[in-house]
Amino acid sequence: MSNLANIDWNLILQRLEKLATCETARAELRNVGPLPYPDEAHASFQIIAEAQAVLEHGQRPFMESLDLFGTWYQRLEKNATLKPLELKDVRHFCIEIIALKEIIEPFSSRWVSLIKERVLDAAEPLSAIDQVMTPDGDIKNDASEQLYKLYREKTNLGREIQSQLDKLVKQQKLENILQDRYVTSREGRWVLPVISGMQHQFEGIIHASSQSKQTVFMEPKEIIPQNNRLRQVEVEIDEEIERLLRELTEYLAGLAAQIDQTRSAMVECDIRFAQAHLSNQMQASPPEFSEGQVELHEIRHPLLVLNNESVIANTVRLDADNRILLLSGPNAGGKTVLLKSIGLAAQMARCGLPICAEPGSKLPFFTRLDVGVGDSQSVDAHLSTFAAHLKVLDQATAAQGLDQLLLIDEICGSTDPEEGAALARAFIETYSKNNVYAVITSHLGPLKSGWDECSGVIHGSLEYDGDSGSPTYQLIMGIPGQSLAIQTARRAGVRQDIVQRALEHLSPERKEFQEKLETLESANAEIERMKKRLQEEFKQTQKSKSKYEGLVLKFQRERENMLEQALKRAEQKVERMIEFAQVTDTFKKHESLQKVKTQLPDVIKAGPATGAGRIDTPEEFTRRYPPGSRVFVSTIGRDAVVQGRPSPKGEVPILSNSMRLTVHWETLRPPQQAQNPTAEVIRKTAKYSYSANEGDRVVDVRGLSADEALSQLEIQLDTAALNKEERVKVIHGHGTDTLKRSIRSYLSRSIYVKKWTAGTPDSGGDGVTWIEIND
């Protein structure tokens, strides 16, 4: 008989799923259901509390990349090479992993620790992807050394072809042959527009014609070899990109199991953070599970709280002796809202969700929840509203035990009052005999009396303010409430003469009963108001106490921080004085300063660490700096990215500022600046170059070996070419002429050099070489 939609459970799930950030989590939240055991619900409460602690720091991890996860992961499992756009999705996935780990890093609770263990370290795969492609999904020109060379060759070929074509279009003899003086391309070949019919006077290959047939596009024979090579280079570029994508895919395929485990952890995080977010919005608290007691403190309807409506909270207490709450009171007085609030609390608790009530609330772990709320009429089954209602009531008689909860609205209320009350009483007696919990609403007068202490029935009424003529929505336990049909008619604007005649029709006994009930309700209402006032005063007192305790704690922490800062400043000042002291004799003249130094903490006085972080073997280097790691290259004074493992000779390929070098692993150190997975940090150094007074770059390689000098010189020439500098001055000295010969031999074949000349007598003579940079 259970139809949870009638107590707004479906609306709660809708609110919950909207707080998830990926579709997989939203689908699971749409189908949240009861857990099998109380221990699992308790564990869920604890996890949600841990998630709430994370959210309190103001950051919410997002899992939007999981919506595209299935597409690229299926291809990864099939060993299909991932395309750049798919790798862009993988990159988004890695970034969200890193963000998740950064957000939960400060926390060490049990659930958070388990998530940390399940989540992949995404820094390395992200670095591998960023090495090959840009954040927008474009392949980098320098993704590999071969690709870098091919793109440079393509650029140079393009310039050569463009230069030759520019010369051709300017030739006077072609003036009557060319349709126009411009260069274009057809079918990937550079061509010139030739007047149709004049192609026999132009040596070349026709590749296309215009739509009007007035122009044919011809490739001059002078550039056919360059065009052929250009096409070949483009094919080689495509092949190299395909190779890089294949290698990157194979690397990611090796992490497939970890990636799938991470996806599962991220979905769980999204679900838990959504539940925690909803709990925060509802101001919910986890309940305790009891054996036979319902105690819901300040219970509220979650949707009213979520809609920021004014909510009247009520406290409901039931136990094994008073387990059937029979609610009565005025129409539109809040009976059904309270019934739904209790039902939602029971459903949320058994689903492992905190309930919309104050801490300390308790209720049984209900294994069955039967709902008889709303119109159950069924035309197909030939059931009237009342007949369908009776069928629901009859099905509820199957429930037995204190772990069963019945929610019935307006029991037998749509038939003759006398017969309806008789039926209702019979059903309630059966429910009581079955020892179940129940919340039942009714306007039937006969049900408001005649229950003995052993019946298990306890009355509850929703208060009505006679002065204002409106309900207060406040629950009063222990007494039945008046339906107040006549007062409701007056409030609804019914004509006064009709209302007056209705009052006259009431029997004297009924009038007397109503007067006594009103007196009792007024007394109870006053008690409840006093109780609430005392509770508010107690809350304010506790709040003030907490506030002042917090201020004291804050003062103590600030005092400790100030003392710590003052100590650090004093230590730094003393250290500076010691550092700038000239000689040991100075310390002897300042015995008080020496005394202060001996009192400094060991960490201040300690010298630099020895042997810390030392790497002794290529294998250890590979473990600490796998491909994609950032390192500092001591020989060139800048950071670089490791491209591969050490060779048998100990040489490691590296990438630094678009330059591909090979250096020995022993020359590599930890990076000078922490890695940033989302941006490349470019460092500039002036260790081996500087600007001379005349504005030319000067490279002093005296004292270096030939290999070291050539390595530094290539870097400086590359920088000069990028900066479009015209000249570079190299100071190598005379010595044995070995260094000079090596440098000049290198310059004679370097792509950066237009020409080189020895220095003049007044500019260093033969110990200096001047270089003119290629355009």
Image (spheres, grey):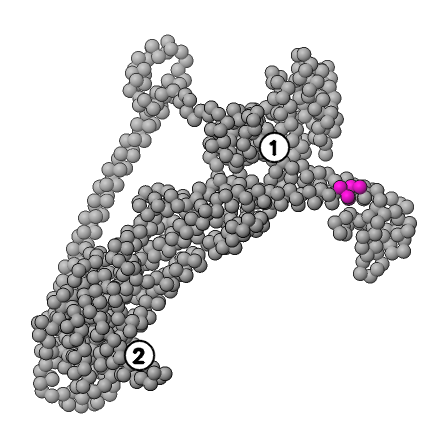
What amino acid is found at the position of numbered circle 1 in the picture? Arg
Q: Secondary structure at mark 1?
A: strand
Which residue lies most toward the front here?
78
**Magenta stretch?**
225-229
Where is 479 relative to 697, above or below?
below
Would you say residue 8 is visible in this rendering?
yes
Quarter-of-image position of residue 481: bottom left
Residue at (18, 63) in percent of width and height: 294
Q: Position of residue 451 (x, y in %)?
A: 10, 76
Nearest the eye: 750 or 237: 237
Q: In the picture provided, is 61 more to the left or to the right than 444?
A: right
| The magenta stretch spans residue 227 | yes
Where is 618 relative to 25, above or below?
above
Where is 230 relative to 412, above or below?
above
Q: Secondary structure at mark 2?
A: loop
Q: Which residue is mark 2?
A: 375
**Disc sitting over residue 660 in the figure:** 1
Would you say residue 473 is visible in this rendering?
no
Q: Position of residue 755 (x, y in %)?
A: 75, 26
Q: In the picture provided, is 308 more to the left or to the right than 655?
A: left
Q: In the picture provided, is 662 more to the left or to the right than 610?
A: right
**Disc sitting over residue 201 in the figure:** none
Q: Position of residue 405 (x, y in %)?
A: 22, 68
